[in-house]
Amino acid sequence: MPPTPDQLDATFIALADPTRRAILARLVEGEASVNELAAPFAISQPAISKHLKILERAGLVSRSAAGTRRPVRIEAGPMKDAVDWLENYRRFWEASFDRLDALLEILQTPVNAPDKPAKKRTTDDA
């Protein structure tokens, strides 16, 4: 089922922030705790938690209960939906560039000099 506009909006809003993109890049390596995710950033753990909530609302991450630990893991579905949506535009632009390339090739082809008038055939030519 294709994503709804609201789902795509949530995904792109989540991806618009460099901290959230960095969190996702870290989660590609494997699940992590909030403290592990907060470590490389010069922001507080509550700020990281706010970023995680935005990522969760977009469906890009999930948290599971593993005893007292609540590891965060990346979820691929919304990202794939965004890529599929963007793919339509990639195909559009590729087709546009192909048409532009064809036009430029036509425009760059040298124009042939006008043909010399054909030489009249004489009986000597035969």
Image: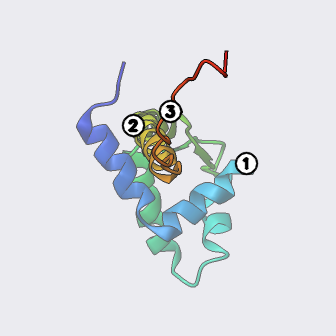
Residue located at (51% from left, 53% from top): 108
Which label sits on residue 30? Answer: 1
Q: Amino acid at mark 3?
A: Ala
Which one is closest to the eye, mark 3 or mark 2? 3
Q: Is residue 74 above or below residue 81?
A: below
Q: Amino acid at mark 2?
A: Phe
**What is the basis of the colouring in this image?**
rainbow
Tag 2 residue: 92
Secondary structure of residue under mark 1: loop
How many marks do you count on the picture? 3
Secondary structure of residue under mark 3: loop
Q: CA distance from mark 2 to mark 1?
A: 35 Å
Q: CA distance from mark 3 to mark 1?
A: 78 Å
Residue located at (68% from left, 49% from top): 28
Precedes in sequence: disc 3 or disc 2: 2
Residue 100 left/right relative to 8: right
For this orientation, the residue located farthest to the bottom is 42
Tag 3 residue: 118
